[in-house]
Structure formats: structure tokens, C-alpha cells
Image: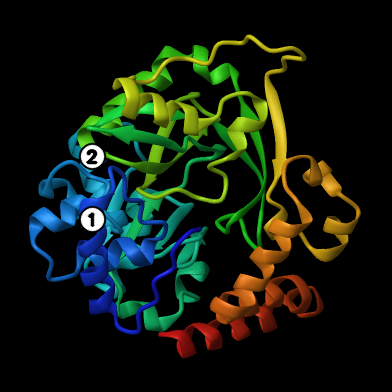
Amino acid sequence: MRDLIFFNKINDFSKLASKISEQYDLIVPCGDFELKAIKDSNLSEAFKLKLLPVIHVKFVKHLCSKIELAKLLKKSQIASPIFEIVKKYEDISELAERLGYPVLLKIDYSGGGAGTFMLNNLVDVSNIPSHFRHERLLLQKFIDGRLLDLSGFYQEGKLIHFSCSEFIQTNGDPFGPSILKRFDKKIFSDKNIIQELSTIGIVLGLNGFTNVGCVESKLDGKRYYFEVDVRPNDWINYPRYFGDDPALHIKNYFDKKGFFKPLKMTYKNQQDTYLFANPSRLNFYELITNKYHWINYSSYYSVAMHKFSLLVFHPIEKFKVCSVRYIKPYLSNRSWKKLKQLALKLSF
């Protein structure tokens, strides 16, 4: 990083961002907080479009909103889980029965799996923390199958690059940040998935990095899309370790307006799948024992700097991670639920 600019107030952020927008061909909001701050700011529509990864103001609505995304996917006839919008908190049980258990209850705006609950029966409904009654809530039918991340990069609504990885292990619960993923190169020969992603780019007006989440159903093998976060994540660089560097695809676009081309297998020791761990989410023992051979695609220095930045800039998030790793194993499920409910009340 060459320059760092700090700000104290959220209004200062949007003003600073708009000042530098003229200097670059590509501006990347790297988190949900930044996206929502720009979306909700009083900047003009023209300035917002320079900062947000969409091609037109009509596509801004689905940013940072699970409800608006679900509605748009349904309207565009893109395969996605059936859903109900919770207008009254007291209607959750009725809506869940209408969809058919199990269902997922989601806060409209949240990240990293926070605010997502699996509801298997009426008992789970009764255990939903009461402070969520003031949130916008979405109920989606749970689909059993492989959870896939189809993160990619778009420009002008067109696909430039994407990768396919399967969630193998997550941090804390099934909906938390991923620790271990298996990347699959065979997907580049699947014309259907390329067509699906291309359609999503057009329908959502995508113009930057994306995290596209879908479930490959065990019942019919069909992919059901439920998440399109318009930002990069911690896994953006991993495809380069098996010869598919997204930076080269992005450079090719800006040099030659080159759009997506399937990966050409031109290197030795070819294989179809690669298992990677995110070292920033491994515990101390896993790091020092080089579990998953993480040192082959990262470094002690980068991991140490990441851990340090969490302590300095994100102490609350670090406390959450440490609690899950070092406190949860020693508590009963009932005690852990009570502790989580208390933490949620304090954070809202």
C-alpha cells in the first residue's frame, strides 16, 4: 500500500472517496461497510457510480440487501431458493411452515454469516433473539447440497474472470467465514455455469469484484444462487497458485477489452482440484505445523501483519474469533447461546 487516508466520520469517507475517484480507472470498495456507506451517502448519483461496482443507479438497490437481491433474482428467473419477506416478526413461524422446514432466517444487511439462523422447527423459531424483531428479515428455503463460491470480476456487466471453490471448513458455524476451500478447474468446461454467471452479470449490472454464492442441490444437481456480494474477499488471489491469475485477466481487459476466456491447461503437473487454507484464520498450532502446507502460498510475515491489524483495527472482531476458538469448546450449548444473545444485545 502506498497511501493510507484515515477518517473519523462516515460523511468524511464518502467525501474523500469522491475526491480520488477521478484519478483511477478502477476503484474497489473492499468491504460491506464501505459499500453501504457509499450507497447511503448524500453523494450525487454520478459520484456513487464512480465508486460502486455497478453500471447504473438502477442496480444500486440490491447492494448490501439480501431481500432486494432475492427479489431481483426471482424476477430475472435465475434459479434461487424460494423465499418469504418477513413483514411482521410474529409471522415467522407461519411463513416458515409455508416454505417448509428447514429454512434459513437472514438479516437483510450483514456479513460473514452473521445474523443467519437455521430453523428446523417451531422450537428454533421460539429461540430467535427478540432484538431481531426490528430488523428487515428474509426467510429462504434451505437447500441441501454443495456450497460453492463462484467469485469473479465483471466489467460493463460482462464476465472477465471467475473461480470455483467448494466450502470445506468454516469458522465457528456453517455460515461463518471459510477456513478451507477446494478449488475446481473442471468448472471451466461447464458452459452452463459460464452462461449462468454471464446472465447474473447483466441482470445485476455488475462492474467489479463479486462473491457469488450458490448451492448445488443434492436432489436435482441444479445450482441455486443466493448471494452476490460486490466486493473481493480473502480468497481472491488463490487461483494464481494453479496458473489462473485473476490479475492477468483484469490487465488484459484494461489493455485490450478482453472478456472471459476459459483457462488453457499449458503447464506441467496438471490436476483438477486444489485444496487451500486461509492462514489468517488458522489457529496457532495449525500455523506452526504448516497444516495444509499454507507456507507454500503465503508467508509468516503476511500472516503476522494480518493478525496485528486485527488487534489494532478490529479488536471486537478479534474478540469474537478468539471466543469461538477458545471459549466455546468449554461451554455447554445452552451457555454458549446465552452468551451469544448477550453479545448481540450489547452490539445492537
Q: Residue at x 24, y 32 (%)?
A: 157
Going by the numbered disc 1, the residue's amino acid type is Ser
* Side (left or right) of 228 relative to 331: left
Going by the numbered disc 2, the residue's amino acid type is Leu
Residue 170 percent across, percent down from the top left: 65, 53
Mark number, residue 315: none
Q: Is residue 200 above or below residue 227?
A: above
Residue 148 percent across, percent down from the top left: 53, 37
Q: Which residue is mark 2?
A: 204
Q: Residue at x 67, y 79 (%)?
A: 336
Query: Callout 2: 10 Å neighbours few (<14), some, many (20+)?
Result: many
How far apart are the alpha carbons under marks 1 and 2?
22 Å
Residue 246 percent across, percent down from the top left: 49, 32
Q: Which residue is mark 1?
A: 21
Asked if disc 1 and disc 2 are in contact, CB closer than 8 Å, the reply is no
Q: Which type of secondary structure does the marked residue at label 1 adopt?
A: helix
Residue 9 in which image quadrant: bottom left
Residue 45 percent across, percent down from the top left: 9, 57
Q: Is residue 257 above or below residue 92?
A: above
* Side (left or right) of 4 relative to 75: right
Mark 1, mark 2: which one is toward the viewer? 1
* Side (left or right) of 132 relative to 164: left
* Side (left or right) of 214 relative to 298: left
Query: Callout 1: 10 Å neighbours few (<14), some, many (20+)?
Result: some
